Image: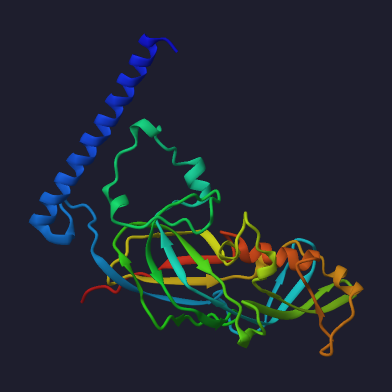
Amino acid sequence: MNTHSARSTFTRVRSFVARRALTAAATLAVLGVCTFAAGVEGCGGTTGLRRVSFSMRVGGYERSPGPYTFETRTGWSVTLTEARGAIGPVYFNTIAPLETSRATVPRAPASRRAFDVRRLLLPLAHADSGSHFGAGRIVAEINEQREFDLLDPTLVAFDRPAAGVDEPVRTAELWFYNRATLRDSALRVAGTATRGDRTVRFSGAFAIDPAAATQEQPLDALRQVRGIPLELIPDEESSVELRVDLRPCFANADFSELLASAPGRDGARSFTRRDNVGAGFEAGVRATSGTWRFRVAPKAQAR
């Protein structure tokens, strides 16, 4: 590189750094004025960084309680007679769902992105070790597990409220841990599947397997389902509901494969992640759409 080219490059870099520094300084100055004038509530009508807490409830798909019957794409009629699971902790993130963050919300070039002072105030979420969802910011959490009946549409509340700040939420993140009450799994199901003259009693579970962890996908990454869509600006009146629908977990299952295995003492044949039923079940549990459906409950009308 000649001297003139090097000098030109240095000048452009110095100009860029100076512009970013001025932007950051101006933002910090505005933040200081707003904080002095309005406390933590923010200024100019924008969302501040108030600390808030809100409730969350979880339950099965909205229908009549009891066994759940549905048809699969492969022509099987499945009836779930048992489905219990546990979720938690739950994290609320600022990052957009994959389908919108990549397709419909184009990002500005790096040189034009606005400086966000909240990056200095809130921790980054790197729990997925570089997955396609990237970083983002966790702005609220429920640090608790809740076990529930996935066949019961009755919503049950977490004992602890979610705690965080009033930063807009775009997605939620579920974590799973095996529980002794679920026979060392995070989610367990049983039922029957019928197609033509074939009927298969089955059972199986979604469990976190520490032996499956790798350097590229550590144990914590195996526990997570990230990027589940949820649009929320938390406040003290917020109430979040999570419904679970297990139909996507069996959408492409071919239960005839289980007939090659011996039934257990209860007459049911167990699926595992090594057969098509178990692999599809785990894929459905880990899916960011379909199985887990978040909803912000309507706020009570003031009288």
Looking at the image, residue 75 sits to the left or right of residue 168; the answer is: right
Where residue 72 appears, as percent x and y from the top left, is 74, 65
Where residue 69 appears, as percent x and y from the top left, is 70, 76
Quadrant showing the C terminus:
bottom left
Q: Is residue 31 above or below residue 75?
A: above
Residue nearest the viewer, comparing 181 with 8:
8
Q: Residue shown at 82%/83% (left/top)?
A: 268
Q: Residue shown at 50%/74% (left/top)?
A: 88
Q: Is residue 163 above or below residue 94?
A: below
Looking at the image, residue 296 sits to the left or right of residue 303; the answer is: right
Q: Is residue 26 above or below residue 292?
A: above
Q: Residue shown at 79%/62% (left/top)?
A: 74
Looking at the image, residue 8 sits to the left or right of residue 201; the answer is: left
Where residue 236 appears, as percent x and y from the top left, is 27, 71
Looking at the image, residue 30 sits to the left or right of residue 131; the answer is: left
Residue nearest the viewer, comparing 23 with 230:
23
